[in-house]
Amino acid sequence: MKLPRAGLGPTVERVETALGAFHAVLFAGLPGEHRNLDDLHEADFKRWGKALGKLHVASLDLDVDRPSWTEQLADIRRLIPAEEEGALSELAYVEE
């Protein structure tokens, strides 16, 4: 997949694989400062959560096929090797 140079606006690429569709998104850099998680305070996490919530609400209007949570868990179950008993046990817990 070849993405255009930054500065040409947002670009989305979709690649179909045996594991499903994957998307890559390219945007020009945003101004600001990158901070480590250890440097964040409670107010920072609240702002982050609020922004993430807005993003999730906005994504509800996207016209895309979304697998159900049961379909997603079934896909995960198919990917976990039978000998990975711990992972399968945790998956069963999540399914319940």
Image (cartoon, rainbow, N blue to C red):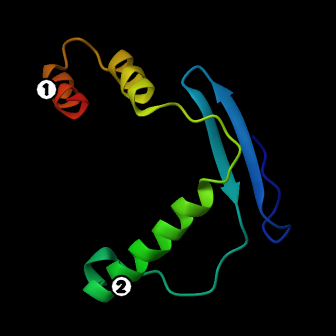
Within the image, what quadrant is residue 26 found in?
bottom right
User: Which residue is found at the position 46% from the left and 67% from the top?
Assistant: 53
The percent position of residue 50, horizontal first and vertical second, equals: 44, 75
Q: Is residue 81 left or right of residue 4?
A: left
User: Which residue is found at the position 19% from the left and 25% from the top?
Assistant: 92
Q: Is residue 38 above or below residue 1?
A: below
User: Which residue is found at the position 42% from the left and 22% from the top?
Assistant: 75
The percent position of residue 2, horizontal first and vertical second, equals: 78, 45
The percent position of residue 63, horizontal first and vertical second, equals: 71, 44
Q: Is residue 8 or residue 88 the one in the foreground? A: 88
Label at residue 26: none
Q: Which residue is labeled 2 in the image?
A: 44
User: Which residue is found at the position 19% from the left and 29% from the top?
Assistant: 96
Q: Amino acid at mark 1?
A: Gly
Within the image, what quadrant is residue 8 found in?
bottom right
Q: Is residue 86 or residue 42 the one in the foreground? A: 42
Cα gap from disc 1 to disc 2, whole angstroms = 35 Å
Q: Is residue 8 left or right of residue 39?
A: right
Q: Earlier in the sequence, mark 1 or mark 2?
A: 2
Q: Amino acid at mark 2?
A: Asp
SS assignment at label 2: helix
The percent position of residue 4, horizontal first and vertical second, equals: 83, 56
Q: Which residue is labeled 1 in the image?
A: 86
Q: Residue furthest right?
A: 8
Location of the N terminus by quadrant is top right
